[in-house]
């Protein structure tokens, strides 16, 4: 098995390095994609405070869920793109001595993307933008009913993308910084199509 792996490794590396540089000739234009992954809720000291209308309870919010996303972007050149996105960040369970609840979050917005080409088919990228988000909550914290909320706040992230024109494959990390007491991290893998 080790000999087989040793003999396949140079072959795979050679094939990857010899990948056609068709993308370089098509380094701009419209693209779209879908992705899925995992999201996790990060709340400072376990308190959601005014965000869910609960001043009288500490929630245990160490939870994660499935995230689904779709995006449409335009690449102006190998170094810069803009992207609109919609992301369903999942439902998180909130546990406390005063009662349990749930919080479900969705977001859509616009990101600016800066790219660093590593090869003709591999890019590293960083993104920053703004997201319009809204939440649906259910449950109670003692005598306080949790309430829905929404807002416009920053989103940013890092990732890598394989450009195998016309197919693209992407892995990325994003932070949705919705509130000082409420951030959602998302790690996703996406597949897309360049037009």
Image (cartoon, grey):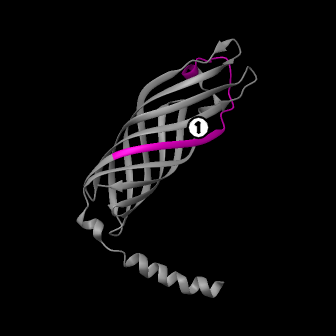
Residue at image location 65% in from the left, 33% down from the top: 61
Q: Position of residue 194 (x, y in %)?
A: 32, 56
Quadrant of the rendered image containing residue 54: top right
Q: Position of residue 108 (x, y in %)?
A: 41, 35
Q: Is residue 95 magenta?
A: no
Residue holding disc 1? 42
Quadrant of the rendered image containing residue 117: bottom left
Residue at image location 65% in from the left, 13% down from the top: 144
- In this view of the protein, which residue sits in the foreground, 16 or 95? 16
- Left or right of 195, for residue 180: right
Quadrant of the rendered image containing residue 119: bottom left
Region in magenta: 50-72
Q: Is residue 52 magenta?
A: yes
- Left or right of 96, for residue 75: left
Residue at image location 58% in from the left, 21% down from the top: 52
Q: Position of residue 128 (x, y in %)?
A: 37, 43
Image vertical order of residue 13 relative to residue 65, above or below? below
Alpha-carbon neighbours of circle 1 within 10 Å: few (<14), some, or many (≥20)?
many
Image vertical order of residue 63 relative to residue 78, above or below? above
């Amino acid at each position: 098995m080790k000999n087989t792996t040793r003999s396949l490794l140079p072959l795979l590396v050679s094939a990857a390095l010899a990948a056609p540089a068709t993308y370089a000739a098509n380094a701009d234009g419209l693209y779209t994609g879908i992705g899925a992954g995992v999201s996790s809720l990060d709340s400072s000291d376990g308190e959601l405070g005014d965000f869910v209308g609960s001043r009288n309870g500490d929630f245990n919010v160490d939870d994660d869920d499935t995230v689904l996303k779709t995006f449409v972007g335009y690449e102006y050149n190998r170094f810069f793109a803009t992207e609109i996105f919609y992301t369903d960040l999942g439902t998180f369970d909130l546990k406390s001595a005063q009662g349990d609840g749930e919080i479900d979050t969705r977001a859509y917005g616009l990101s600016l993307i800066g790219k660093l080409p590593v090869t003709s088919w591999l890019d590293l990228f960083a993104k920053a933008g703004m997201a319009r988000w809204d939440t649906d909550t259910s449950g109670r914290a003692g005598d306080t009913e949790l309430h829905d909320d929404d807002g416009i706040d920053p989103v940013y992230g890092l990732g890598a993308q394989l450009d195998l024109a016309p197919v693209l494959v992407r892995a990325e990390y994003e932070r949705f910084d919705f509130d000082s007491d409420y951030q959602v991290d998302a790690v996703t893998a996406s597949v897309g199509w360049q037009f």
